Each structure stands twice: as C-alpha cells, then as structure tokens.
Image (tube, rainbow, N blue to C red):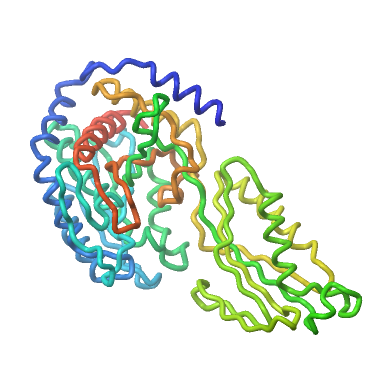
Amino acid sequence: MTSRFLIALSALALLPATAHAALTPAEQKMLTTVDSEQARTIDFLQRIVNQNSGTMNIAGVQAVRAMVEPEFQQLGFKTEWIDMKDAGRAGHLIARHVGSRSGKRLLLIAHLDTVFEPDSPFQRWERQGDQAHGPGSGDDKGGIAVIVAALRAMQAAGTLKNANITVFMTGDEEDAGSPIALARRDLIAEGKKADVALDFEDLAVDNGPDGKPADFGSIARRSAGSWTLTVTGQSGHSAGVGTGGQGGSFGAIYELARIIDAFRRELPDDRLTYNVGLVGGGQSAKLDGGKIRIEATGKTNIIAATAIARGDMRALSEEQIASTQAKMKAIVAQSLPGSKAEISFDEDSYPPMPPTEGNRAILAKLNAVNHDMGLPQMAELDPSKRGAGDISFVAKDVDGLVGMGPSSDGSHTPRETVDIPSIAKQAKRSAILMSRLAKERR
C-alpha cells in the first residue's frame, strides 16, 4: 500500500493545473458567489465559534443549532432536531433538500459540538490576517461554514434546485453518547439511503513529493476502540515471588507486564496502532466508572494480587480488528504461574472506514474538479494520519470522502487555527463536486 501511495502521489504531481479549464457557466457562477459572500461566511463562522458548544454543554449545542438551522431553512431545506437525552447528549440536526427523483442522494456530515467545555479558557474568535483562532474554528464549525457557503453558491447557480442533499450534524462527535448504537442510529439510517457521503471535517494538508505543503484527499479513516485488561495473581510474601515457595506465583503486575510487552512485539500490522494509556496494580486495584482512573494500594513486600490496564486500538478494517483481537486474546491466555488474565473490548467504539475503489472514484471526481479549477491534484492521505470520525458509521453502506472542510491546525488544543482563504477554496470545490454528483443518475 505504501509503494502504491507514493507512485500515485508522484504521478499526480506531474499533472498540469490549468485555470478554470472546463467550468460551465453555472460553475463559474458558484466561484464568484463564494468570493462575493466570503465576508458573510466568515461573519457566520465567527458567531457560531463564539457560542460555546462543548459536547457536554447541552444548552450550548442547542444554541449553535438555533444559529445554524435558519441558514438551511432559507435555502429550502426542511430541518429536524433529534433529541439525544437518552444517550446523555444534546441531539442532532438534520437538514433535507429534495430534488430530482433520479439524481444521486448526497449525505453531508459535520458536527455542532467541540472539545472545549464552558470551563475552558479558550472561548473566543480572534482573527490575525488570514488566520483565525477559536474553539471549533476548524473542527468543525469551519466545516459547517463551508457547507453553507457551498449550498448558497449552488442556489445562486441554479444547481441546488434538483439536488437531493441531506446534511447531518451530530451534537456529540467529540464524545459520543452512550449507548453508541442509539447515538448513531439515525446517522446510520441516513447512510443507508445515500449514494455518496461527504465528511466536512478539516482538509488534510501534508508535505507533497516536493516537500512543500499540499492538499490531500482522505478516502479512509481508522477505527477507534478501547480495551480493558484485568489480571489477578496469587498474593503472598515477596520473598517467594516466582519461586516454588508461593506456588510459583509471579503475581498480577508481572503478568500484566508480560502481556502488554507481548502486544508491543507481536501485534504490528499495516496501519494498526495500539496504545496502553492507563495502568495500575497492587494488593488492590479498582477502575472507576468512567474508566479513566485506577485506585490502587500495595506494598513492596507483597506480591501483587491484581492489576488493570486500559488502552485503545485503531485499525483499517473490520477484518484487521477481528484478527488483532484474536491475537490479543491468545497472548492473554498464556498466563504466568499463579496468575490469570482476562481482556474485554468496549462495545462503544468507532468502526473503520477502509479504503475502497468506490471512495477512490469519488476522489477522482474531486480531482476532476481540481483540474477544471486550476488546482493541483490531490493524492490519497495515509489513513494513519487521520483520526476516527462519524463518516465511519456509514462507510459500509455508502462510498465517501473525508476532509471537505477548511484547512486548520492545532485541533483539540487552545492553538486551534483556521486558514481563512481555505474556506472559500473548499466551498468552491464542494459546490462544484456536489452539483456534478447530484446530476448523476442513481
């Protein structure tokens, strides 16, 4: 896969970029509309960024919904709010536009929430030239701004009228509600109806073949799931650890160390990562209800009776997940004398979005747009450079593309910054791509 990626990247870099080579009058209209409305778009983005919508700020997420919803209603979309109080979250906003019966159905995915709760010091928009700092300025309020700008351009050009478009904006992408089957039930249902899914999280920018920053297309995302390892061991005086004197017991901590080191040595696979994020053990060890803290007690002269570890695993396909979990279980089963271990895998996990030929075909259509706009071709991004996301929940039902939002930096940190010119660029790309896709027959 790596060699194929590099060859494709090099080949794409050789393709010429000619300005607006084959744009229709309607597509030209979209470009001019985006440019003429850029100030409006940035003002809209600033307003929603300045409204806190940390995932757990239910009222804040609903306030952003109230600011965003009219933008779609003005364009003829019918909106629906799906309450998610049973999942412990605010809810999801859906906007639907019905067009031609024969045209492809597009599903646009974004999210209303951010990682910054009301107690975060990072709360306000601050512009510095072509850059703007602000919570969610890129992830993902910037994506919502791109969607609105693109749809307004389509309306001005007359291509929105016959387009079948559903916009699904989750209110808990940064910390999904539980159970996740409920929290993503409605998104999955929309995915089953769609022909193409476009994810409006941030545009991937990485070094190209010449070592300079370049835009990349994301056709895959890895999964995100957690696991818990629980080990018990025969306790006793430390003088007998690992000897016949205490039944040969090495205790729980040695057994836990054996297991996680075996994971490090024996699990490597293409684009697979596995991390140990929390460890505790001793005479007693208890994991809290949120599974983020371990309370442990022990003494240096007592063989540890229990040990716990929590970690995550990120894989590129369901097959890779199943294979890796089987390997982990086999490692866990090879217990040291006097110990016993069990591993469990959280049910509330994000599935993978594997790279498929269908996804590549959508990227090829985006590259046709790039060519006609006079922009460089976009190669495939290495999936390991992108985190999990909501589009993965529909990936098994519909072809998709990730990264239609603006270019940003410092996501999930107080350094989050959006590149303002990229908002217009992405809105133009999106408007033309969606207009062309919507005209295709199902």
Residue 371 or residue 157, whichever sits in front: 371
Image height check: is 344 above or below 376? Answer: below
Q: How many marks?
A: 0
Image height check: is 397 above or below 90? Answer: above
Residue 95's spot in the image, x, y percent? Answer: 25, 51
67 lies left or right of 284 = left
Q: Residue at x 52, y 72 (%)?
A: 291
98 lies left or right of 403 = left
Residue 300's spot in the image, x, y percent? Answer: 70, 81
351 lies left or right of 233 = left
Quadrant location, the C terminus? top left
Residue 374 or residue 32, whichever sits in front: 374
Residue 307's spot in the image, x, y percent? Answer: 67, 74
Q: Residue at x 42, y 58 (%)?
A: 184
Residue 108 or residue 235, whichever sits in front: 235
Image height check: is 8 above or below 316? Answer: above
Residue 353's spot in the image, x, y percent? Answer: 49, 44
Q: Residue at x 32, y 15 (%)?
A: 16
Name the quadrant containing residue 361.
top left
Quadrant location, the N terminus? top right
Residue furthest to the right: 244
